[in-house]
Structures are given as structure tokens and as C-alpha cells.
Amino acid sequence: MSGVIKYFADILHGIKTLWGGMRITGKYFLSPKEIVTQQYPEIRHKQKIVYDRFKGEVIMPHDENNQHNCTGCGVCEMYCPNGSIEIITKKIPGENGKMIKVIDKHIYHLSMCTFCGLCIKVCPTQALAWGQNFEHAVYDRSKLTKVLNKPGSSYKGLNKKKEAKS
Amino acid sequence: MDTKLKNYIVKENGDIILNMGPQHPSTHGVLRLEVVLKGETVKQVVPHIGYIHRGIEKMCEYDTYKQIIHLTDRMDYLSAHMNNEAVCLLVENALGIEVPERVKYIRVVLDELTRIASHQLWWSAYGMDLGALTAFFYGMRDRERILDIFEESFGSRLLHSFNTPGGLMHDVHPNFQKHTMEFVKYFRKKLPEYHQLLTDNVIFRNRTQGIGVMSKETAIAYGVTGPSGRGSGYSCDVRKIAPYGVYDQLEFEEIIYDEGDSFARYMVRMKEIEQSLNIIEQAVDKITDGPYTAKVKPIIKLPEGEYYQRVETARGELGVYVVSDGKKFPYRMHFRSPNFNNLFVLNTIAKGHLIADLVAISGSLDLVIPDIDR
């Protein structure tokens, strides 16, 4: 007899607990305000989806005169744990005919980057910064290798140096 | 000619050898379990590891102490912050660097936020393993709030290499304290839903209670730590037995269950979430103004000798062992990862259970595969 009672008590208990779970899902089903799903590709241009500090990629900010802050010292290349930064420098004639070392190409391999942020932290002139772009999918792997300084750009401090000297 | 490949082997005595993995959805990673079955009953489980071995310990020998931090993220990616902190504490203790008070409290808050996020993900995935797909969405919804706090302050959601020997990489966002308190308030309201959805569910209880019982002796013999060990009555919380940071100044309980089954391990984690919320509430108010890093030399060189530091991650005790020869790279670096020990107890506790219960048992151990292989 007690076995029969236990059998039905178990069924009742099962239904009760299942009803408890169903009540939660039902509550959210009937209150659309609680829905947190974002329709991602559609909202991409309408609202900001990442925070300001988001680590999307390493960029080099340029001002309106196409000038940047990079001196080509190579500290970021030295600190990078996986060799995703290559610095190629060149020598140009400066004031008094002296040769000055400036940056030629700041090569950044996005495919190797682990976003640890050491290059940005150690840069003595704050030449590097985080960019907010996170859609990095490309059809060709070679497109992930980028040159950060724009063609024809120059070091911001170069003119100041010349002015100070003259 | 039969060219169809068999995915199991039948032995002469009727035993079936079946491979679970390397791409099995319930292992959450590339882990192969070679299961010897008698009918549907598990006779033996042989874990085969090494599918995601990256040689992190060897790579550390060619990196400076600041560069090592980002590698430790990639071991146990769900408790990335604690892994970072282990290496940082080791370097700080070896050099005698006094970390600012602000940094200590921020680190505690981040530790506990990471722990909650990890347990939420585990809760979601465990429900999914046992067939309760609804739980997955509720866990992920609340975890998103923590990840938003992380993204706002550090720029990344999962692998934030935010610690550095001596302090933090940069200061936290001005809204950090406000948003953390908002989350604590929000999550305290939502936590009863978790219990109503899964803990009280009769199917879930029948599938976990009395399944995979691990005795205290087994836990100690295999070195099972973390919530899995505490579910067997083994007091192994590093935050209590060897406090680091400011854990000795905060009030919290060490959750211990004596049953040792899958449900006990589940309950330890659910109660730990509540304790973590308590810790966050205490620590957030104590974050004072001040510098976010101590003064550290650009190139860190540890004095010659051996160093060991252990911390409590979301899965157990993580130990970092360094042998230094006085240069800027460590001579040898070893990680005592919690998941390695937690995995190999599986053979002992899964013996005699059905193969469907193997998923429940391995899920309750909360394994993260990259931490096993390193």
C-alpha cells in the first residue's frame, strides 16, 4: 500500500518541480521587456556595441597633417611576446646634414597578436592605441599583416626638433 | 569488401571499447576518454590527453616575467585572472614588492567576479550536458553582465591580461565599483531562479544524487582540490588555509559537503557563488584611491633560487613553481594545474556506473581541457 502512495507522491512531486521550472520560462515568455537578445548584424551601425577600451586591434593614431607619434625606437618590438610587431627604420638627412633614424614601416601581424597590451603600455611616446574594430574575418591570410603608419606620414616630433635646434 | 570503419572494438570476453571524444560535446574540449564497457556499465575509463598541448611551460623559459602573464591566461581560460595573479604574487613575493592597498582589493573583487562567471558558465553547460537546455540561456544571460564589467575596464571579456607584476596594467574604469555593486544586487535577485530551474528539478536530482561518489580518502589521494574536493569533505580552500592578498581580512565561509556525489559538487559551487557575492560586497567598499601599480623595474630579474606560489582558482589549487638562475627569463617554470588531478580521479569514481552517468560525473568535475595539457 505504502508503495502505491509513494508512486503517486513521486509523480506529484515530479510535476510540482517541473511546474516550478516552467513557471520561470513562462514568466520570461510573457514579458518581452526582459529579453536581452541583440539582433547583431542589424544593430551594427545603429548603436555602439563595444566599450571605449575594447581591445580590437593595435592602431597608430594619425593627426590631420598625417603625422604620428612613433619614433621607431623598437621597444614595442622588444616587448611583444610572440613577434607580431616588426619595426623597419630608415635614415633621412636632417638639419646640418646629419642622418636621423626615423620609422619606415611599422608592421603589425594581427594573426599572431594575443592582445596582451604590452606594446601599448611600454610605448614611451604613446604612439600606439587600441582600435575598436573587431570584425577581422578576411579571405586571405596575408591581409592580416598590416602597416600601421600610413604612407607619406612622418613623426610629429621631427619638426619640433628642427625648430628647437634652429 | 566492407570498408565501413567501426567506431568501437568488441573484445573476446564481450567487453566493448568505445572512444568518447576527442570531439565529444560533453567534454567541452579535445579530451579522449577510452571507455571499457560491459553492456552499458563502465568498467574502466582511460583518459588520453595531449590534443591541445602547446608547451606553455617551455615557452615560459623564453619569456620575461611580464610576458609570461599572457600565457597563463590560456591555461584555464575561465579563471584567467587568478592564473595571472599566481605569477604576479610569486614575482612580488620574491622581490619583496609592496603592492598598493587599492590593487589588493581590486584583485580580490576581480577574482570573485571571475569565479562567479566561471561557475555560471559551468552551471549552464552542466544543465546542457544533462539535457536541460533552458538552463544554458539563463546562465549565459547573467554571465554577460560580468563580462560587460570586464570589457568596460580591461577591454577584453575572457582573456584579460590585466595583472602585471607590481599591480595592474592600467587603472580600472571609474564606473567599476558602481557597476559591480549593480551586478551583485541584480544577481542576488536572479540566483533563486537557478535553484528553481535546475536544483529542485526532479530529473536533475535523480541523475546526480548518489552518482560518482568520491570519498575523502580518494580526493586526498588523487589531489582533487577546489569545489570537487570540497564536495567530498576535504577542506582545501587555499583562500582559507594559506591566505594570499587580503583574503585574511575578509569574512567568508569555506563550503564543505560530505556526500561526495555529483550533487554535492554541484551544491558547493552554487553556495560558493553566494560567498563570492559576500566577498565582493565587503571588498568593493574598501577600494581606496591611490596608485594602481607599485614601482617595478622595467626588466625583472628574480634572485637565484626556487619559488612556489599557490592560489585558489575556480577549479582548485593552482601552483606556480619557478627555478631562477638570476637572469631575466626563468630557468624552469612548472604549473600544478587543478584540472590534471581532477581528471584522473574519473576512473575511480565512474566505475560501475552507466555510460550516461559518465557525462554527469565528468561534467560535475568541471574540467577545462587546455589547463590539463598546458
Image: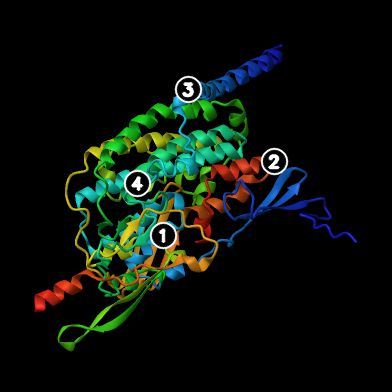
Task: Give the mark nearest the N terminus, 4 or 3.
Answer: 3
Q: Which mark is residue A51?
A: 4
The chain identifier of the residue carrying mark 2 reads B
Q: Position of residue B216 (x, y in %)?
A: 51, 43
| Marks 1 & 4 on one chain | no
Question: Residue at the spot x=47%, y=37% of the render?
Answer: A38
Residue mark closest to the camera, 3 vs 1 = 3
Mark 1: secondary structure: helix
Question: Residue at the spot x=51%, y=37% of the render?
Answer: B266
Residue mark closest to the camera, 1 vs 4 = 4
Depth check: B194 or A106 in front? A106
Q: Circle 2 is placed at which residue position?
A: B354
**Mark 2 neighbour density, 10 Å: few (under 14) some (14–19) many (20 or more):** some
The chain identifier of the residue carrying mark 3 reads A
**Mark 3 neighbour density, 10 Å: few (under 14) some (14–19) many (20 or more):** few
| Marks 3 & 1 on one chain | no
Mark 2 residue type? Leu
Question: Residue at the spot x=16%, y=83% of the render?
Answer: A95
Q: Circle 3 is placed at which residue position?
A: A31
Position above or below: A26 against B185: above
**Could you give the CA–CA distance between mark 2 and mark 3, rounded to whole angstroms?**
41 Å
Q: Position of residue B211 (x, y in %)?
A: 61, 37
**Could you give the CA–CA distance between mark 3 and mark 1, rounded to whole angstroms?**
42 Å
Mark 4 residue type? Tyr
**Could you give the CA–CA distance between mark 2 and mark 4, rounded to whole angstroms?**
47 Å
- B39 lies left or right of A29: right
Question: Residue at the spot x=30%, y=63% of the render?
Answer: A128
The chain identifier of the residue carrying mark 1 reads B
Mark 1 residue type? Thr
Q: Circle 1 is placed at which residue position?
A: B72
